[in-house]
Image (spheres, rainbow, N blue to C red):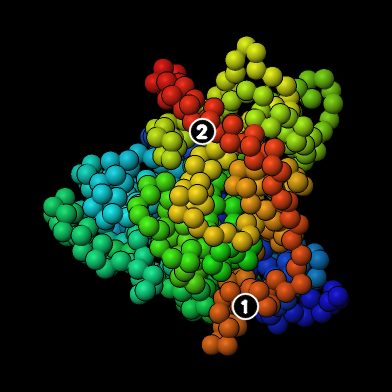
């Protein structure tokens, strides 16, 4: 065990790595030691806002959250170790993927940041998927760009550069317009042989009549693609002041390629090798399996992205995760407050989630839809959260909570069934991370039932993507030809770690399949709600 004074010396000598991730509801900063142990952290709660029909975050909020989370970490370092944080060995930034951040030559944002949650790019995504014969989801950056072109948006006359949220933060702090390959693979299709944007598809896009009328060069519009381990620049003097408003942090610190939350989730769960996968369950929910070969055909339900080291990944992504569950928990909390019973949110979640284990395997005929936003996998344009049942359905608290958990996995299961059943993709292990897995057993049991595969959770999974990007920063600092990222994770970061595994229960697997029959048949109810509940 490393003593407190040794940790203080480690911090003073810059033998640390800092990771900061911008999630959809929280910005989190983690400082890790040279042995990958978290030493201090800080966070900032935020939420997306709907402005003029666009889901967005203001630039001011981005910087406020970055600086606040860093200052909280800074204060914890001072309090725990008696050290003023001035030097860090390496830094990394990550964020929710996709979306659209467009800038002019002066670096000014041309339109409000359009996040991954926006689904108004349906026409563009469909046209590009047909043109490329490669699935282009609605949330991808190229779909946002092409939709703006189809809409003849005036800002395109000034467009000079576009990037993701992680790429934007990195650019502002280093002056480098680069992106980690996993994040880049959510902007535009990647050629896994060249580890760069697919040149043939870039040409197809450029030759579109709608695109050709604009003066921007598509080859210069996107950030440069970098693999994990590459040096992506250093913290500038101006960048140091933007990150640390106290002025204590020195400049010149090396920074790794900025990555997306999909990539940092893979790292945080040690699931970047072929036949491994991970599932991230939060505001959105997605599962990724590292593929041994390309898929046999185009599937519009499956995204093809990459690991941070450039291997092909099949991703099933659902826009809607556990926001509706959170809303229901809030209602139950209001009830406990009304009867003067005080329960912490953590205990309330545990109590309600645990009830789901007691429900009927198929949820007793209780059907729910967690659609806060549209869901492309099921063809639903907008969100209308619903709970539906027949008069004779077995309507109990366990079945209600079980239905909420199952429906949060419903759209995802459709995609996973394509990978595991139609494409016969091999999956040796699936690791979970995110809020769903904080309650022991429950989340793992639900996912295991959905995919009929054992689901494991590591203690590190609770640290999330901020820890994952800190690990990538550390890998860059130690990077040499002696080991790959996969070897680095397995032999150094996760050596000795034991994962808690939950195997699928046959009756739950059958029950989930029965629930999915209700779920698929009831999609027309959800579509009708969109049409009539205005």
| CA gap, disc 1 and disc 2 | 39 Å
Residue at 45%, 50% (x, y): give it. 422
Report x, y in % for residue 440. 77, 47
2 sits left or right of 314 in the view: right
Examine the rendering and report whether any part of residue 115 can be seen. Answer: no
Vertical placement of 270 versus 437: above or below?
Answer: below
235 sits left or right of 101 in the view: right
Identify residue for label 1.
488
Vertical placement of 379 versus 174: above or below?
Answer: above
Report x, y in % for residue 194. 35, 75
Instruction: Say which quarter of the image contains residue 276.
Output: bottom right
Residue at 37%, 47% (x, y): give it. 300
| Picture quarter with the N terminus | bottom right
Name the mark on residue 372.
Answer: 2
Which label's residue is closer to the chain start, 1 or 2? 2
Residue at 38%, 49% (x, y): give it. 299
Name the mark on residue 83.
Answer: none
Report x, y in % for residue 509. 64, 40
């Amino acid at each position: 065990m490393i003593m407190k004074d040794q940790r203080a010396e480690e911090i003073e000598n810059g033998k640390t790595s800092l990771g900061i991730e911008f999630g959809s509801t929280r910005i989190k900063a983690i400082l890790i030691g040279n042995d990958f142990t978290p030493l201090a952290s800080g966070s900032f709660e935020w939420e997306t806002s709907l402005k003029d029909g666009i889901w967005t975050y203001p630039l001011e909020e981005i910087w406020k959250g970055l600086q606040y989370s860093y200052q909280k970490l800074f204060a914890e370092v001072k309090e725990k170790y008696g050290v003023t944080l001035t030097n860090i060995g390496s830094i990394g930034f990550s964020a929710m993927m996709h979306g659209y951040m467009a800038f002019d030559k002066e670096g000014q944002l041309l339109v409000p940041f359009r996040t991954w949650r926006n689904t108004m790019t349906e026409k563009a995504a469909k046209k590009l998927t047909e043109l490329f014969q490669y699935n282009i989801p609605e949330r991808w950056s190229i779909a946002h760009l092409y939709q703006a072109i189809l809409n003849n948006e005036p800002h395109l006359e000034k467009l000079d550069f576009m990037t993701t949220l992680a790429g934007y933060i990195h650019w502002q702090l280093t002056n480098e317009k680069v992106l980690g390959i996993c994040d880049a693979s959510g902007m535009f299709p990647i050629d896994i042989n060249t580890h760069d944007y697919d040149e043939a598809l870039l040409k197809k896009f450029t030759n579109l009549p709608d695109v050709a009328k604009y003066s921007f060069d598509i080859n210069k519009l996107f950030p440069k693609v970098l693999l994990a381990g590459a040096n992506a620049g250093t913290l500038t003097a101006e960048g140091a002041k933007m990150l640390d408003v106290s002025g204590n942090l020195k400049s010149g610190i090396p920074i790794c390629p900025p990555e997306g939350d999909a990539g940092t989730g893979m790292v945080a769960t040690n699931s970047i090798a072929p036949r491994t996968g991970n599932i991230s369950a939060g505001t959105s929910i997605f599962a990724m399996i590292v593929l041994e070969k390309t898929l046999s055909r185009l599937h519009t339900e499956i995204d093809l992205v990459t690991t941070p080291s450039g291997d092909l990944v099949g991703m099933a992504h659902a826009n809607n995760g556990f926001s509706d569950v959170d809303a229901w928990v809030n209602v139950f909390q209001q009830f406990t407050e009304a009867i003067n019973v005080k329960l912490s949110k953590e205990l309330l979640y545990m109590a309600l989630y645990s009830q789901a284990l007691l429900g009927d395997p198929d949820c007793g005929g209780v059907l729910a839809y967690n659609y806060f936003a549209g869901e492309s996998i099921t063809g639903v344009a907008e969100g209308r959260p619903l709970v539906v049942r027949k008069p004779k359905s077995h309507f109990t608290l366990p079945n209600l909570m079980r239905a909420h958990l199952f429906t949060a996995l419903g759209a995802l299961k459709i995609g996973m069934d394509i990978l595991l059943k139609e494409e016969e993709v091999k999956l040796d292990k699936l690791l979970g991370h995110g809020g769903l897995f904080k309650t022991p057993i429950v989340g793992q049991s639900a996912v295991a039932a959905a995919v009929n595969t054992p689901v494991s959770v590591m203690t590190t999974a609770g640290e999330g993507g901020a820890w994952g990007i800190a690990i990538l920063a550390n890998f860059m600092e130690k990077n040499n030809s002696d080991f790959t990222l996969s070897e680095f994770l397995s032999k150094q970061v996760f050596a000795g770690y034991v994962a808690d595994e939950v195997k699928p229960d046959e009756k739950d697997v059958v029950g989930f399949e029965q629930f999915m029959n209700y779920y698929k048949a009831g999609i027309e109810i959800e579509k009708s709600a969109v049409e009539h509940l205005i």
